[in-house]
Image (spheres, helix red, strand yellow):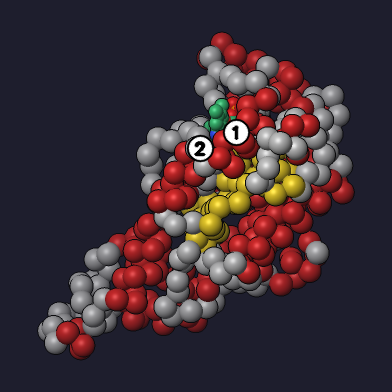
């Protein structure tokens, strides 16, 4: 299924993009005056192959999984919080639930590796059970997961993207929940970007500055012990990543294979996006970056992808929140194309051409 999906991903449709670029200059505004919104409109048209792309309704998929490295004291919160937040997502009380409701999104919560037994029983009723294993192994001691488990998690992400598409959704927002996943993301990013761990590591849920040096040392020890090959993204993911990160990468691939625009969230989501792009560079053409997270490694991940995020609200939450908040800008871009009058239709005199 992964190989089929990879084979189906082609570049975005530049011809449609060029047509929409020309059309934008016929709308009743000075050429280029809607700035980034015009760029967004062209991107969405190129992704979908549609001169009048639509992004509503959006889908939010939140993947949850635990991390063995939580045992090293790298998060400000205990591991149980992952399962407890899954219950909160299902009950509709988390930040992502609020913003998903605001934008009219279909929301799905998917357990790909929550450690708690409760999570697959009463706690997570209403969550999709795609558990690959009960959390990763502590990557300081052994590989986080096997290559087969990483592929299984990626494929659960592909299925989630397909469910969203089959339900009629037109834009995919991918979120995550997993205590200690900023450590796994920092490890993966350091290897894939070649940057030192010190440059990509950050406070995550808010560990004290004194504990940040410990978090950095744990990640450095893990990379030294696991020795992943930076040119092999699947190996880096399996040795140092997380099940939710694998599923997120899969969801991006699944969306791109069906030309569905993806709105990428914060630090963890962007590291997963980097993994997806290393697996298949054409996926990049289907990604829009919602916001710049306060987690310091996010800038490095964004730079690695040559990505410019839409918003900077100083968020550091994850769950898909920054992407959900950016969604109305995508909708505005599509409405601008579909609803604005042209100079000809409105009888407005055109100005001098050229900027
Ligand atoms: C209540 C709560 C809700 C969250 N929602 C997202 N995260 C975020 O924090 C975690 C990563 O930070 P670290 O690596 O420091 O554990 C992830 O679960 C991420 O999604 C949360 C964290 C907490 C505590
Ligand atoms: O940007 C993120 O996704 C993020 C930052 C800190 C903690 N959790 C998530």
- Front-most of 283 and 159? 159
**Residue lying at 62% horizontally and 36% vertically, measured from the top left:** 87
Q: Do the residues labelled 1 and 2 touch (CB within 8 Å)?
A: yes
Quarter holding residue 10: bottom right
Disc 1, SS: helix
* Residue 229 seen: no
Q: Name the residue under label 1.
A: 85
**Residue lying at 25% horizontally and 73% vertically, measured from the top left:** 31
Disc 2, SS: loop
Disc 2 C-beta below 8 A from ligand 1: yes
The location of residue 60, given as percent across then percent down, is 55, 53
Q: Mark 2 points at which residue?
A: 94
- Furthest toward the top, the residue is 210
The location of residue 76, given as percent across then percent down, is 58, 19
In the image, 185: left or right of 229?
left
In the image, 305: left or right of 238?
left
Q: Real-space Cα distance between discs 1 and 2?
A: 8 Å
The location of residue 298, given as percent across then percent down, is 52, 39
The location of residue 115, given as percent across then percent down, is 76, 31
Quarter holding residue 155: bottom right
Disc 1 C-beta below 8 A from ligand 1: yes
Which is nearer the N-term, disc 1 or disc 2? Answer: 1
Q: In this view, does 260 lie above or below 102?
A: below
């Amino acid at each position: 299924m992964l190989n089929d999906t990879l084979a189906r991903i082609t570049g975005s449709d530049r011809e449609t993009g060029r047509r929409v670029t020309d059309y934008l200059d016929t709308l009743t505004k000075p050429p280029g005056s809607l700035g980034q919104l015009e760029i967004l409109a062209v991107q969405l048209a190129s992704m979908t192959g549609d001169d009048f792309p639509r992004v509503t309704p959006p889908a939010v998929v939140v993947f949850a999984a635990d991390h063995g490295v939580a045992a090293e004291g790298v998060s400000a919160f205990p591991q149980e919080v992952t399962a407890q937040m899954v219950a909160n997502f299902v009950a509709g009380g988390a930040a992502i639930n609020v913003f998903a409701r605001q934008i009219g999104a279909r929301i799905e919560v998917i357990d790909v590796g929550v450690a708690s037994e409760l999570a697959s029983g009463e706690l997570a009723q209403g969550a999709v059970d795609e558990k690959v294993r009960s959390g990763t192994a502590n990557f300081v001691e052994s590989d986080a997961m096997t290559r087969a488990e990483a592929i299984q998690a990626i494929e659960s992400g592909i299925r989630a993207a397909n469910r969203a598409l089959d339900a009629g959704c037109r834009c995919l927002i991918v979120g995550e929940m997993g205590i200690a996943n900023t450590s796994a993301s920092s490890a993966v990013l350091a290897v894939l970007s070649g940057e030192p761990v010190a440059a990509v590591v950050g406070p995550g849920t808010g560990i004290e500055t004194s504990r940040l040096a410990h978090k950095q040392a744990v990640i450095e020890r893990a990379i030294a012990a696991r020795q992943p090959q930076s040119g092999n993204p699947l190996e880096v993911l399996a040795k140092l990543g997380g099940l939710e990160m694998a599923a997120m990468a899969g969801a991006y691939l699944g969306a791109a294979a069906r030309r569905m625009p993806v709105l990428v969230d914060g630090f963890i989501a962007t590291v997963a996006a980097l993994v997806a792009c290393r697996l298949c560079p054409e996926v990049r053409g289907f990604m829009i970056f919602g916001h710049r997270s306060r987690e310091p490694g996010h800038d490095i991940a964004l730079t690695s992808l040559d990505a410019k995020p839409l918003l900077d609200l100083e968020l550091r939450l994850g769950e898909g929140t920054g992407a959900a908040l950016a969604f109305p800008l995508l909708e505005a871009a599509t409405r601008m194309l579909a609803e604005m009058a042209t100079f000809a239709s409105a009888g407005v005199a055109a100005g001098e051409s050229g900027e």
